[in-house]
Amino acid sequence: MGQRRRSREVALQVLYQLDMTGVSPEEGISLYFDHFALNRDADSEPVEDDALPPVDGNLKPWSQESLSAARAFAELLVQGVCLHRDEIDGWIGSASENWRLDRMSVVDRNILRIAIYEMSYCEDIPPKVSINEAIDLAKRFSGQDSGPFINGVLDQVLAAMGKAKDSSASPL
């Protein structure tokens, strides 16, 4: 699994935590890495090299260098989503017919937020990559109907973003 994918998983978990507890983004990131970033050996004893824990048996712990890069991208996503939340939620609201934000699952809503942040502010990531990554996150962390729902909303957002760029309009 790629470093950015794992960073997106971390960002999703932190954003979920923020929605559930109301802690600040900085505190949420610190709590995540303080509590879940220990690399453990077979006997579950902490070892000196910090790394993200495996989410499943297929992941190997990261080196300190990889952990630093993963944390940096996860922080970028969390901070960016929080900073631009109203704008991002406007895009979601305009693209999700018959679904208010408060009716969406917390996981789906935050997957959409991460993807829309990337599509809007991460010029080095093609929008289709952000959409595919969001669908994969939904398959892993949400219900069976979430993948098509996420895909549909993000396709509409992408189309609307293209129109907005052409007319310099905003969904808000």
Image: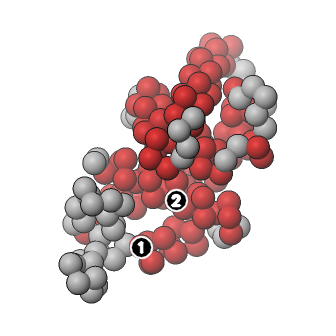
Tell me: 8 left or right of 160. Answer: left
Q: Secondary structure at mark 1?
A: helix
Q: Which mark is residue 22?
A: none
Q: Nearer the viewer, residue 146 or 27?
A: 146
Seen in the picture, residue 156 relative to 69 is either above or below; the reply is above
Instruction: Give the image location of residue 71, x and y in percent.
Output: 40, 61
Q: Nearer the viewer, residue 18 or 136?
A: 136
Seen in the picture, residue 86 relative to 27 is either above or below; the reply is above
**Spatial distance from mark 2 to mark 1, Cα to Cα?**
11 Å
Which residue corresponds to the image point at 44% horizontal and 26% vertical from the top-left?
Answer: 128
Quarter assignment of residue 64: bottom left
Residue 58 visible at all: yes
Q: Quadrant of the C terminus?
A: top right
Identify the residue at the far bottom of this view. Answer: 45
Q: Secondary structure at mark 2?
A: helix
Tell me: 145 left or right of 131. Answer: right
Instruction: Give the image location of residue 47, x and y in percent.
Output: 23, 83
Instruction: Give the image location of residue 12, x and y in percent.
Output: 52, 54
Which residue corresponds to the image point at 25% horizontal and 56% vertical from the top-left?
Answer: 58
Indicate which disc, 2 or 1, sits on the residue closer to the N terminus.
2
| Residue type (three-letter) at the residue carrying disc 1 | Phe
Which residue corresponds to the image point at 47% horizontal and 35% vertical from the top-left?
Answer: 135
Instruction: Give the image location of residue 147, x and y in percent.
Output: 52, 34
Quarter assignment of residue 65: bottom left
Tell me: 32 left or right of 57. Answer: right
Residue wearing tag 1: 36
Tell me: 145 left or right of 106. Answer: left
Residue wearing tag 2: 13
Q: Please tell me how crowded label 2 is: few (under 14), some (14-19), or many (20+) other residues with Cα within 10 Å.
A: many
